[in-house]
Structure formats: C-alpha cells, structure tokens
Amino acid sequence: MAQDHPPIEFARHIQPILDTYCVRCHANGVAKGNFSIESRERMLASKGVVVPGDAEASRLIHLVRGDDPLAVMPAEGERLSDADIALLAMWIDQGAAWEKGVSVRRDSAPASIKPRRPTLPPPSPEVTHPIDRIIARHAAERGATLAPVIADPAFIRRVSLDLVGLLPTPDAVQAFIRDADPAKRASFVRRLLEDDRAVADHWISFWNDLLCNDYAGTGYIDGGRTQITAWLHEALASNLPYDRFVAELVNPSSSESAGFANGITWRGEVSASQITALQYARNVSQVFLGVNMKCASCHDSFIDRWTLADAYGLAAIVAEGPLEMSRCDIPTGEFARARFLFPEIGDVDPNAPTPERMRQFARLMTHAENGRLARTIVNRLWSRLMGRGIVEPVDEMANEPWCADLLDFLAVDLVDHGYDLRHAMFTIATSLAYQRETAAADESGRRSNGFVFRGPSPQRMTAEQFVDALWSFSGGGPSSVEAPIASMPLRGRWIWSFAAASRDLPKPGEAIDIRAALELTAAAARARVVVTCDNQYALWVNEIAFGGDAEWWTVETIDITHALRHGANEIRIEARNLGDAPNPAALFLEGIVELEGGAIVEVASDATWEWRPTHSQAAVGVHRAHWQPAHDVVEQGFLGPEVNSMIASSVAALRADPAAFARASLANADALMRSLGRPNREHVVTTRPADLSTLQALDFTNGGMMHAQMEQGAHRLLDECAGDGDRIVDRAFALLLSRPPSASERTLVLEFLGSSPTTEAVADAMWAMFMLPEFQMVR
Amino acid sequence: VSWVSQRLIQPTGSRREFLRAASAAALAGAAAGSWSRSPRAQSVAPSAVNRPRATADTMILLWMAGGMASTETFDPKRYEPFEVGLPAERILSTFPSIETALDGLRISQGLERIAGVMHRATLIRSAVVPDLGNILHSRHQYHWHTGYVPPQTVAAPHMGAWFSKVRGRGNDAIPAFIDIGQRLEGVGEQEELKAFHTGGFFGSEHGPFLLPHPDRAAQSVRPPEGMTPGRFESRRQFYKRLLELDPRLKGATDEQRASITRSLEEAHRLLSSPAGRAFDLSLEPKHIFDEYDTGRFGLGCLLARRLAEVGARFIEVTTEYVPFEHWDTHENGHTTAARMKQVIDRPVARLILDLEERGLLDRTLVVLASEFSRDMLTEGAPGSTAKDQSRAPAEVMQEMIHYGLHRHFTQHGSVLLFGGGFRRGYVHGETADERPVVVTRDPVPLIDLHATIYSAMGIAPDTTFEVERRPFYVTEDGKGRVIDALFA
C-alpha cells in the first residue's frame, strides 16, 4: 500500500518534522531514553523504535500517535498533526531512507565559543563600512534587495532615540540638515556618544532590565536586595570597558556593585532552585553568555544540553559552603562541584576558597578565548539598534545566527577596541545597514536562521523614551531624581538662624528670611536650583515668587531662569519651622546658573548667607531686624539617607547638564511607565513587549496623567508661538516628528485648531500627534 | 436588561473558540503545505490549551486580604469570651457560633446575612497552603493568585490573566481581568503587590484593569476628566484623519504599527460602549447601593455584580491588603474581626442573591478566600520556628488588645464557593476541635483548589504555555487535581 504513494523524501518531508518535534531531546548530544536521531544508524540502534518497512511494528508511530496515553511523544509541548504522523508512517513503510549527508544535528557538538575572525568581503567604492560589506554579500547570496537609506530628518530622530533616548531638538535637526559635510552622520553619532550623561541616563534602563536593578521593587522591603544604581550609572557614564564591567558584576569588589551577584533574598523559605547562588548561576549565564539555565537549575534540561550539575557548578562558584544539589526541590545527597560552563577554555578550582573561585570565574568570563561574552553583548546591541538580533532569541546564543560573519566580526571588533561598547554602537550606527528604511520581517520565523536582512526591523519607543518625550514636550517632568545615581559631595550646607545643637533646637513656628546675593556677569541662559527645607519654605528670586513646599521629605528642582538678570540678584527664602515643640530645622539649596556664552555659576546655601526674622514676626512699630550671618546646622545629615540621596541625585542631574530634566529612566516606575512596558525588575528582562496593548491605549486615551501633560504642553506651545496656528503646526511637527508638516497635514491641523487656537484644541491636536505610529516608532 | 440578553444571544467565548479553531486549522494547513516549522517561535506559544466543559463563564474572587481567621468566620470552634486572666492557650474562637440556612452548619457570629445563604454554598474547611517559613503576606498572596511561590524564574501570570488569555473577554467592551479595591501606590509592600498584579509573561494585554476606588470606577471608562463627549469624539475624528495622511500606513504595514491603531480603536470602543455604564455605581437604585455600601469592599461587590451582568470574565474584589490593617490582625484581633465581618456580611450575601435573582449564579462562580488563616498561639504551622509577629503577645488576657488571633496559620483555611456549577449546601473537609486546629479530613491543597476553579472556568489544570522554550502550566507542573466532590 505504501507503494501507492509518491516516495517520501527525507530532507523535504521528514527532517522538518524531526527538527520540530524530536531534536530537542534526541539529537545535539541529547539522547533521552537512550534514543537518538542524529543519524540513521543511531536511530536504528534502538531496537524496535523504527522498523524499516513496517510502520505498525515501529514503536515511534505508536508513541507519536498517543496509542498509550501514558507514553506519548513529544513528552512536552505540541503533538504531531495527523498529516505528520501519516508521513512518518509512509516513510518507515517505504524503508526509512535517509539521504547521505543530511543530518538533523544542527551543529557538530556545541558550537565553539572561541572567537572567530571572519574574512571581510573586499570593499567597493559604494560599500566601505565592514558591516555593509558583510551585509552586501549576505543580501547578494540570497537575491535580496536592501531597503533605501533614510533622509537626514529620519536619521537624526532614529539615532538620537537609539543612542541617548531623546528626540532631537528642532534646532539640532535644522543644523544637521544644513550641515554640508558628507561625514556629518558619523560626526553626529560621535557627538551623541560623547555625551556621557545622556548615554548613561538612556542605557541604564537597558542594564536595569538585564541586571534586575531598580530603585524600588520586591525584596528591598526587608533588606533582601541592594541596588547597584550608583555604580552602574558611573560605569556607563565613564564607558567602563565591558570586560571590566562584567568582571565587577560577577566578582564584585564592593557593596556598590554586589547587588547583581547577590540576587534577591525573599523573606521566608524558598524552593531549592531559588537560592541566591542559583539565581547567580541563572542570571550570569543568561545575561552575559546567552545561556538559559532556568530549566537546568531544577533538573537536567529537556530542551538543551545543560544539566543540573552545570547549573549547580556555576552556583557552587559563589556558594559560601558545600552546596547540596536538589532535583525538582528534592535533595539528591550529592554536592555540587564548582565548574565553568565551557571547560575548553579553562576551569575554576573547586577546592579554592570562594573569593578565589570568583576571581577565577571572572577571568574565564573575560578570557580572550571566551568569544561568547562578546558575541552575546554585540548581539544585544544589534538587537536594540536594529530591532532584531543576529541570533534570536537574544538569550539563546547557541542558536544559529542569520549571518555568522556579521556576529563574529562585531564580536572581535569589540575586543580589538578594548571592549568599548560605545565603539560597537558607533560601528553599528554608522553603517548603512542601520540607516536603511525598516523592512517588516516575517516574524513567524523569528527563531529560524532563515532571516534575510533588508533593513532594520520596526521598533516602538520604550516606556522611558515615550515618557521623556512627553515630559520634555510639556515641561512637566518630575522635579527630582529618584535613582541614587551619585554620591559626590554637595557644595550646599544645611543652614538655619543658629547652629541648632540637640540641646538647643529651633522653636516651633520660628519663621526666618534667608538670603544670598548673586552677581552675574551676563544674562542667564538657564538656571535651576535644588531646594528643600525642614519644614516649609517659599522661594523668591528678585522678588519674583517661585512657590515652595511644606514637605521636608521631598526635594524640588526649580527653574529660576526668567527671574535672573545681568548684574546683582537676590535669592530669598522664607523658611518656617513647624511642630508643637522645639525640633530640628534647616534649609538646603544648591543650583547652577548657565550664563549666555556658556560660563557656569554655582549657588549653594552656606554660612555666607544671611537671615533675619520674617516681617510678620517683628513687633509692630519696631524696626526690621538686621540681617545676620546664617549658621551651618550641627547635624548636617539629620533628615536621613533618603532625602540626602534625593538631593545628591538632583544636584548631580543639574551639574551634568543644567538644561536636562530628570529622566524617566531615573524615576521610579509610575502607572503609565508600567503600563507602557517598563517591567518589574525581579527577573532578568532582555526583550520588552513590542505591541501596544488595549490597556496601554486606554491609559493614553483617558489617563489623567496623559491628559494633564497634554494641557500643560499646549499652554507652553501657545506661549512659544504667541497663539499663531501656523507656528504651532511647524513647532509641533519639528518637536515631535523632527520634520515639517506636509501641505495636507498643515491644512488639516490648522482647520482643527481654528483661527484662534484654544489650549484645548492644541492639547487635542498634540494628543493625536503623540498617538501617531510615526511618533511612537523609533524606526 | 439589554446587556444580559446580548450576553445570552452571543454565548461568551464562542466567537473566540471559533477563531482559535479556525486559526489552528489554518496553521495546520500551512504547515502541511509548506513544511514550515510549527509556530513555536512566538515568545508565548500555547503548547496545549485543553478545554474541559466550563460550568462557569465569569468568576468573582472575594479576597479577604491579610489572612482571615477561619475560626472567627466559617469554621468556629469553642468560644471563650473575653475576661481578664483568660489564658491565651484556651482561645480558639472569640465569637460564638450561629445557625445557618444549611441544617447542621454553624458559622461565626457577625455573619448572619451570609448564614442566610449558606444552603447555596460549597464550604471548604480544609484548604491548606504551604508554610513558607517567616511570613510575608504578599508572598502568600502571590502564591494564591498565580499558583507559584515567589520568587520564580519567569513572571507568573495572575489567575485573572489566565482567564483573559485562555478564555478572553466575555464582552468586547469590558476588560477581561478587573481588579477592584487594591491600591498599588502608597501602601506597604506595594512593590510585592505589584509583582503579582500583572499579566506576567502573557503581557499587559492580559494584565489587570485596576479600579482601586469602586465609587470612581465610572471615570476610568470615560473620557478624561474635564473633556466633554463632543470634544472627545472630535479629537478622535481628527486623529483618524491625521492618520490617513501617514504615508507609512498605506499598503503593507508591520504588526507593531498596526497594534497602535488597533489598540487605540479598542480603547475607544471601550470608552464609548454602552456597557461602560456598568462601571457607574450612581446608576444603581439608592436602596441597593446603600445595602452594599459598607465601604470600598461593599461597593466593590456591587460593581462586581454590575460587571458580571455585562460579561466580565474575572473580577477580584478585595478588602484590600494594607499591612496590619483589616484582616491582618496583629493585635486587637477580636474587635477588628467583628468590624471586618460587618464589612463583608451584607454585601457578600446581597451579591449572591442578586446574581441568583438575575439568573446569573449558575454561570458565575463566586469564591471567597484568603492567603491563610490565623491562630492565637501558633505562628505559621505547628513546630514552625518562624518569627512570631504578634504585636500584642500575652499569656493571659489583660486588655482587649490581647484578645484575638494574632498569628498567621497555614494549616487550615476556609474557602467559600457559590454558583458556577458547584454543589449547593455542601461542606467539604474538617478540622480538629482543639489546637492545633489542623485539617483532619479531605485536605485541599491550593494546587487542587486551583485545578478545580480553573476546570470550572473551562481550563484544564495541565493547560500549558511555552515561555522561553519551557512549559509553564496553569497549575504547577500540570499536577493540580480537580476535586469532583465539589461539583453539583
């Protein structure tokens, strides 16, 4: 009967079925149940499983058909379709032929992790960049046409969002377009990457996701988790070489960087696979090596070659004492032996003490022969900048890349340049490959290596990019930085009317004026001050009121630019102590004034400031009291570490860039950011969801925060454009889309705004622009 | 009325099931035709979505947050009234018991209204949860809501997210997973609460629609405050016209761009649907509103009823977890329990009767549960070395503050189920009459309770999704067993 059918071809009909359903457990070095399909010989070596010429006698057919419900294959996951089963049966009936040279084994043993230096295709006059030379050959071999290169406005918008997370200012766009230098794109990329603060502020989100670091989250409540924020931000700002970065994280030299290695300790008992040593094993292997140890930290993996002993081998490197292995939460009685995943490049000495094992491990992670470290990170960077990894998923680096030469080139190039991540970003962003129009890939094959590159893949803004754009549009961002990013000494001092030792505390209700003179040699281009007071203050600059605050546990950053003038200025603060009994009171202010021409003037509260009782407290008919010198209060840190850290971060933000607002990446996640996909960072997150969900859209459409920001931004836009519709349209398109409106867009928006635009109309028009896919997509 | 009939005309889930079947067939066809690989490539691919016949289409979870003591509510033991000098070890219950509508069943004083509907209930008295050592409420709540003890290596979805993912919305204009009463900002352990109030690896599409204040729920499905319906509609029309001018949306487009416009359309549909009236408690007759109004929990029950009427899939109403508040009695437990019973008694009973009156109880499963129970003396479980967290420890009673169940207890617990195909007037399991009050018959581990609930809602306990290439089951390892005795 089998002869009635056309012959089954192994490579065409059978191999895809085996690849899909069987190879996980029965190939690539894995032979579950002692059954392997790596070759015909090995398959037939298991007696009775496949009986050539007799499908009904072949146990394989009974297993995939599920004749015995307790013995069904595949043991995990989706079952074979009836059509697949029929094909297998026909193939066996026809003799189970297996063409020579066809193997279901996808690579010979595990692929080597050593670096490989590919030979670059020769340059041509049009194609010089190494990436483009590789891509040109890749495309030519597949008969693919590459997408066209994008124009200047689209490029500057894309690259600004990608490298520093911010939309380019309209001025920057104009200057860029006018620039006639043929090398201007590379120059612009270089300038972006030279902005240490902006690069760090943007990329800290990427690393926070990867390294389970956040400013609030599970585990902090009872000290089971520590932040690495200050260390991380500094490492990113100073472009710490990646090998040293990784060495520090896997073998921390101080408590500042230990949070990643230490993991999260939950209160109470946790399952065996969640002890912190195994968290370390999983996180280190996933983040830095693209190896998924989640299965293997509980039992030998069903899906790849990693075993329980591998996971525990990594865990034993950091474990303080003997580490008993548990399988599926049941102790095995065996003790783990510290070992490295890739013994071909070396191993750790299991008998060495813990600190020495960790040192050895850090050396192996950053060993010259460990090409996996560089491949994993350049693949992540490529994925971030191009919307799709060269290997997918980015956490499974054993998968085949769609272009091995490209991956291997980027990896050795990173190492050649001293593990300089910004160099890798520069290399990618200056390639024509990066600058092409997006090509929507067929995502149904996201894991397969059959991807053909035509251009970058589409990518939506992250939560932080969207919120930064929103805040910079509205001017309504947070006034203080919540991430403890800096521990640099402050210039400002806590001051009051007297030194206020503990025996001698300020009275409740005491109200004083505190002032400082500020001489400016030019007009102020930008001026911001960080202020807080225990208990209450109001700020005036040259008798222009800037409001105040009555909460000692909050810190405000206030823009005082418009009140300052060339020459003499006065900063005056009315400060008041509250409470029912004498209690500590003090004021803190530190700020930076950027003058026209670029000079910087610092201002900070200290003993050179003066005070006097506020007027309302002076008795009627008595002369105003004289100004007297203010005093440093005795106990400078009396408000506790949280307030002091907020002050430090806010001041650091001013110092780095007086024009910068507090970035979303440095704020605690709010409801909008969470809704837009900023994750809870108790797990390693390497890919955020791509699509906009209905609940996110709801937040956009009726969320109070979104609505308020639109109205605030509309006010600002109306002010800037003096209410003129045409100017509003131009400005809005320049701000949000980095391009001028088309004629039909202009007509449509003007018609909506009406002849004298109201705040409401502008807010609604801006909302519509924020909702445009063109706005929300980075590329 | 029209909402109800709409639901009856289009049985919930049927359209979705059809679509799933159709797309599965299409994929099978594609695979057979092109020999392409199976669609495992998606980050979350269903490996096996088994669908037992559902006995319920909507679930309302009434969450007694903070650890409701069974012996003060649905499993009363020997009553010892307060008196100075009363030894703590004598105390099992601080309330007398009362009769209920079910012959022979007694529950705790203060639950008279619920007692009146107990002949409609299945009462499990033998629910047990794993003892996780030193107690952190939010950890046990995470476990109860996801079926997985934290920490986990992937983000486990909340129960509501499972219903959203597998069964989808019952009404296109109502989010599938609605969470009423829990604030996630400004409360203790808020980060730990956020960790399980999520869609997990199913993504935010299946995350909770949060309504911390039921009396303000209407606002969440209306245009932003201060925006008239006319302005809202004209903004939308303008957006659509502006969108038409976007050259990128002509012809082929990618999924991410498409998801932006599609989701905004969905959001608009939700905000302009008449079903949105269900969120508005002011439309309820005053005497009904007043009957439910014992505070946010009571109004949450009313909101849940209104949402069940329009086909919401999963609604949780919580008494709200705030450390040391409400059911989290670390001191003064008797007084607090008396107050909490006032909070829940009227609205819970009314909810059951209202659902029944409307013919909805048969297909609506109401579950009342808590993360664990409490005891006067034992912290966690007998023999546990967990840290004693009582704030009013006393060997003998001196003041009222000492009188109550101030320790967390994991080895018994009461769960109340109404409707949704469960037996009426049935008590399952039994606990000891003396300390330690452990389960003596038919223990129901959480995993089996979950299997039973999921099964009633049409999801087999071994339903699994693939995440990061590994199977993730709705009950751990797919091993939850359905307790058949609980079904009618």
Image (cartoon, grey):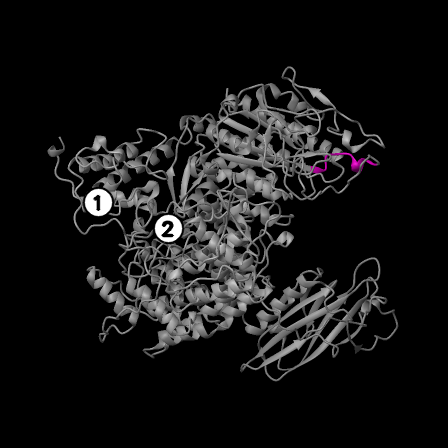
Residue under the point 55% across and 73% down: A656
The chain holding disc 1 is A
- The magenta region covers B399-407
Percent coordinates x, y for residue A666 in the rendering: 55, 62
A752 or B24: which is nearer to us?
B24
- Residue furthest to the top: B103
Three-letter code for the amino acid on which mark 1 is drawn: Arg
Badge 2 vs badge 1, beta-carbon distance below 8 Å = no
Percent coordinates x, y for residue A776 in the rendering: 42, 57
Of helix, strand and loop, which one carries label 2? loop
Ranked by sequence position, the earlier of labels 2 and 1 is: 1
Q: Which residue is mark 2?
A: A305
Percent coordinates x, y for residue A210 in the rendering: 48, 58
Of helix, strand and loop, which one carries label 1? helix
Residue under the point 58% across and 18% down: B425
Measure the C-alpha gap from mark 2 to mark 1.
Answer: 21 Å
Q: Is residue B400 magenta?
A: yes
Three-letter code for the amino acid on which mark 2 is drawn: Arg
A746 or B8: which is nearer to us?
B8
Would you identify the image quadrant in which residue B296 lies? top right
Q: Which residue is mark 1?
A: A40
Dot 1: within a 10 Å radius of its alpha carbon, few (fewer than 14), some, or many (20 or more) residues?
some
* Circles 2 and 1 on the same subunit: yes
